Image (cartoon, rainbow, N blue to C red):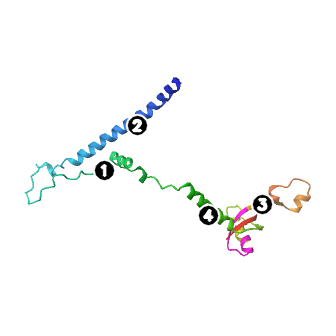
Amino acid sequence: MSDRIGNLIARMRQPIAIAMVMLSAIMVSDRAWAQAEAQPSPSPQGAPAQPAPEQSVPAPPSDPAPKENPGLINEIGKLLEKPASMLPTLKSPRETIDDAADALSRLTKSPGVKGRAACPVAANGAPDCKAAADKLCQSKGFKEGKSLDVDTTRNCSARALLSGRKPEESECRTETYVTRAVCQ
């Protein structure tokens, strides 16, 4: 048991050390950023800064609101104050089940048709079964469809089949058919 704990500690040393180095670098850069903002900029061409002539400016309020520090640590602090604001809203299990039931009922209301429509060969050589599903659904009076089942056959020439030998690839072609489609 203690051997497992020792292995766990040994494996965690390097990631923890890297995280500590990164955190200290972020803190140092954040402080340097804040100090750079607080220092007045030097006047051009090395001339000593001349105080501006005093004008009748109202005195600043005695307790000014603290200036927001735009550093990474400040942003992480904001996340830790309101962690729920960063997470997406989750649906309850009941809402998820209702959504699934609605989707399923829409699917079952879609009429499925049976038939046989050949898939034309597309420009890339693959069968275009979307066109065949549309054709099958249009033959049944619908607008378009999506294929549910396809059937593939290999058709060879009569000469190749009657020769008594195994047909070569060039003597046969593969045809694909849509046999069932969901129509809209």
Task: Tell me how many marks there are.
Answer: 4
Residue 138: say if magenta: yes
Q: Residue beneath label 2, please?
A: 19
Residue at image location 34% in from the left, 41% down from the top: 26
- Sequence-wise, which precedes: disc 4 or disc 2? 2
Q: Earlier in the sequence, mark 3 or mark 4?
A: 4
Amino acid, disc 4: Asp
Q: Amino acid at mark 1?
A: Pro
Region of the chain picked out in magenta, as a range:
136-148
- List the residue tagged with mark 4: 102
User: Which tag is nearer the camera, tag 3 or tag 4?
Assistant: 4
Query: Relative to 63, is 178 above or below?
Result: below
Residue 7 appears at what percent x and percent y? 50, 27
Which label belongs to residue 30? none
CA gap, disc 4 to disc 2? 47 Å
> Separation of disc 2 and disc 3 at Cα?
58 Å
Quarter of the figure with residue 19: top left
Please tell me whether mark 1 sits on a helix, a strand or a loop: loop
| Mark 3–mark 4 distance (CA, rounded to whole Å) | 31 Å
Q: Which residue is mark 1?
A: 70
Horizontal and vertical percent for residue 130? 68, 66
Front disc: 2 or 3: 2
Q: Residues within 10 Å of mark 3 (few under 14, many from 20)?
A: some
At which x and y percent is residue 69? 28, 49
**Earlier sequence position, callout 2 versus callout 1:** 2
Give how far apart the Cα atoms at labels 1 and 3 are: 63 Å
Read off the residue under disc 3: 151
